[in-house]
């Protein structure tokens, strides 16, 4: 089995981190490759960033897709997820949906800890779209830009404090990490907080592995049928 994990931003060090965390979540005989589109923003922190990134993301998936059995979109906004499901043969899972659905097996109330305040409303929108908003105690921004997660020496302490605050204020029972760049912090945070901490990269990759092993893929009935063939000018 081969799984392709695509980081929609173009920060190579984050793509490498995402790949390591994804590979650690699968069983023997599963090959996981992590790539980024090679063009687009260095991080996705706005609707504009997402709009710029999605065409490059879809182009990368179209170029590489035939060689893989399943796919992960490794950005917590799940950009391009529905379009990717229309064009790819194997199952496609976004890390926000996977994280929120996985944590729902573990508790009745969870909090999301994310990067910047401006993404909080969008994260609430995602939770509503996935039907899990009633389980969300709160969404907390730690005010660290995505590209600073790797370089800010205070990043871990800031995220840990945000998690502690979320658990106390929301009376939550688990934490979802709201950025792929936090994927490597999951086990450490879970040990310190003594609650389940779910990273969407691991959750999504494991979910794709499960779906492929079950022989399941995206329904082609109605919404996720292949897009109508038409001329597209100026392909990316």
Image (cartoon, rainbow, N blue to C red):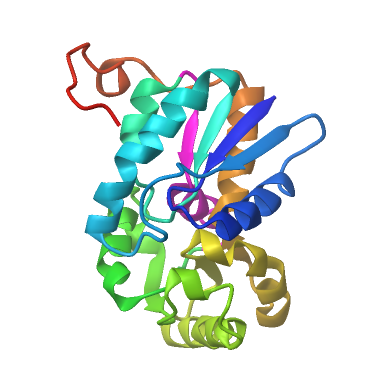
Q: Find residue 94 and report its horizontal and vertical position in percent.
A: 45, 44
Q: Find residue 14 and report its horizontal and vertical position in percent.
A: 57, 59
Quadrant of the rendered image containing residue 23 = top right
34 up-or-down from 178: above or below: above
Q: Find residue 182 and report its horizontal and vertical position in percent.
A: 56, 67
Q: In which quarter of the image is the N terminus?
A: top right
The span shown in magenta is 89-107
Looking at the image, which residue sits at the far right?
28
Q: What residue do we see at 52% from left, 59% from top?
A: 180
Q: Is 222 placed left or right of 203 in the picture?
A: left
Looking at this view, is 207 or 89 the one in front? Answer: 89
Looking at this view, is 209 or 133 the one in front? Answer: 209
Q: Is residue 104 magenta?
A: yes
Q: Is 114 placed left or right of 228 in the picture?
A: right
192 up-or-down from 182: above or below: below
The answer to whether any part of residue 77 appears in the image is yes
Q: In which quarter of the image is the C terminus?
A: top left
Q: What residue do we see at 69% from left, 77% from top?
A: 194
């Amino acid at each position: 089995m081969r799984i392709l994990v695509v980081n929609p931003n173009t920060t190579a060090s984050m793509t490498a981190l995402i790949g390591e965390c994804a590979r650690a979540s699968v069983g023997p005989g599963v090959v996981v490759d992590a790539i980024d589109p090679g063009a687009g923003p260095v991080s996705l922190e706005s609707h504009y960033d997402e709009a710029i990134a999605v065409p490059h993301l879809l182009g990368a998936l179209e170029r590489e897709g035939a060689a893989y059995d399943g796919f992960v979109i490794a950005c917590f906004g799940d950009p391009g997820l529905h379009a990717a499901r229309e064009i790819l043969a194997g199952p496609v899972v976004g890390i926000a949906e996977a994280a929120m659905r996985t944590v729902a097996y573990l508790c009745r109330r969870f909090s999301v800890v994310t990067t910047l305040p401006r993404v909080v409303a969008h994260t609430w929108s995602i939770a509503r779209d996935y039907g899990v908003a009633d389980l969300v105690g709160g969404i907390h921004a730690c005010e660290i830009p995505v590209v600073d997660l790797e370089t800010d020496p205070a990043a871990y302490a800031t995220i840990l404090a945000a998690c502690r605050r979320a658990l106390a204020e929301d009376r939550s029972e688990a934490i979802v990490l709201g950025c792929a760049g936090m994927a490597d912090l999951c086990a450490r945070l879970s040990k310190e907080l003594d609650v389940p901490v779910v990273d969407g990269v691991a959750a999504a990759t494991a979910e794709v592995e499960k779906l492929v092993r079950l022989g399941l893929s995206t329904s082609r009935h109605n919404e996720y049928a292949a897009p109508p063939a038409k001329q597209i000018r100026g392909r990316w």
